[in-house]
Image: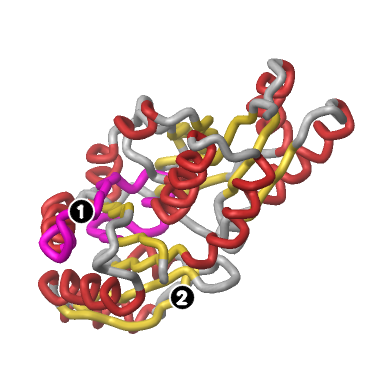
């Protein structure tokens, strides 16, 4: 079997310890904080998550930009030169143009390296939903599966990745047009938090609302038990933006349901956090 490398963007929101253990190439992405440029890497080398969310709370504004095709070529070409095929699992095209940039780059590289197998998949996933997909893909790679087999599994599984997202900071959703100004104002006063999911086109969709943190945890557990084989051990991922206490409570509740579940906790990166703000809590798993 020919060697291949799984690649993805840092929007996969996998914690630094786990990222270091994986043979996955994570492509950094840019964000600007009050017009000062930064790049996010899995080790948060340019800005820690806590500092980023503190700056947001102080009123600084963060914007993001996708890698262009030339940047993707710079990340991909050394792998091809070293004799590795590439399976790229991209951040959802429903929220970013990253997938299109990656496709352009890889199409150019296919002409230059026709002997290499190069596959690019639109994950239709975000944050640790994307992370869970690439994590399980690498588990299959470690088990000896070919690039074609793993790619087919990703295609077959990507829309089974459940995304449950509860956001407490409505300002950033309002700025991005996800909720109305009136909803944001009322929600902030009444502690109403919108519940979002990633739909079939890989876009964010508001599907419900909860009031208060206790109800948020209960919502996650109810959704998990309803949509997953909750009693069968599986890997799950939780991501949060400066909301570790609630993430730990959610992890504990899931482990009480079944101690055999493996639950990873990740911090939401500045790239994703630019659009969610602080206080976000998420749960990702594979639906039955």
Snapshot quadrant of residue 251:
bottom left
Q: Position of residue 168 (x, y in %)?
A: 24, 66
Do residues under tags 2 and 1 come within 8 Å of each other at their CB atoms?
no
At horizontal 16% and vertical 50% (from top left) the residue drawn is: 244
Q: Position of residue 272 (x, y in %)?
A: 42, 51
Magenta residues (range): 254-282
Which of labels 2 and 1 is toward the front?
1
At horizontal 56% and vertical 45% (from top left) the residue drawn is: 65
186 sits left or right of 36 in the view: left
Q: Nearer the viewer, residue 63 or 264?
A: 264
Decide whether residue 272 is among the magenta residues.
yes
Decide whether residue 141 is among the magenta residues.
no
Residue 239 shows in this picture: yes
25 over 14 or under it: above or below:
above
At horizontal 48% and vertical 67% (from top left) the residue drawn is: 160
31 over 160 or under it: above or below:
above
How packed mark 2 is, by other alpha carbons closer than 10 Å (few <14, some 14-19, many 20 or more), is: some
Q: Nearer the viewer, residue 152 or 130?
A: 152
Q: Which residue is mark 2?
A: 205
Q: Quadrant of the C terminus?
A: bottom left
At horizontal 64% and vertical 54% (from top left) the residue drawn is: 152
Q: Which residue is mark 1?
A: 260
Local secondary structure at mark 2: strand
Local secondary structure at mark 1: loop
């Amino acid at each position: 079997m020919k060697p291949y490398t799984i690649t993805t963007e840092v929007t996969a929101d996998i914690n630094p310890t786990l990222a270091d253990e994986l043979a996955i190439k994570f492509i950094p992405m840019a964000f600007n904080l009050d017009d000062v440029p930064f790049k996010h890497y899995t080790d948060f080398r340019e800005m820690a998550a806590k500092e980023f969310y503190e700056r947001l709370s102080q009123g600084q504004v963060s914007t993001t930009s996708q890698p262009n095709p030339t940047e993707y070529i710079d990340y991909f070409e050394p792998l091809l030169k070293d004799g590795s095929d590439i399976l790229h699992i991209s951040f959802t095209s429903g929220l970013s143009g990253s997938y299109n940039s990656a496709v352009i780059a890889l199409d150019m590289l296919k002409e230059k390296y026709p002997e290499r197998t190069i596959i690019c998949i639109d994950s239709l996933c975000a944050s640790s939903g994307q992370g869970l997909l690439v994590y399980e893909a690498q588990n299959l790679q470690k088990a000896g599966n070919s690039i074609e087999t793993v790619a087919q599994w990703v295609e077959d599984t990507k829309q089974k990745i459940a995304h449950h997202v509860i956001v407490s900071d409505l300002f950033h959703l309002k700025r991005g047009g996800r909720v109305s100004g009136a909803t944001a104002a009322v929600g902030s006063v009444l502690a109403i938090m919108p519940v979002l999911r990633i739909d079939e086109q890989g876009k964010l969709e508001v599907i419900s609302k909860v009031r208060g943190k206790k109800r948020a945890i209960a919502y996650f557990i109810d959704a998990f038990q309803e949509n997953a084989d909750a009693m069968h051990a599986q890997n799950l991922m939780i991501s949060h933006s400066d909301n570790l206490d609630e993430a730990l409570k959610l992890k504990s509740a899931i482990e009480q349901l079944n101690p055999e579940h493996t639950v990873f906790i990740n911090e939401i990166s500045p790239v994703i956090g630019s659009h969610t703000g602080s206080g976000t809590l998420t749960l990702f798993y594979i639906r039955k």
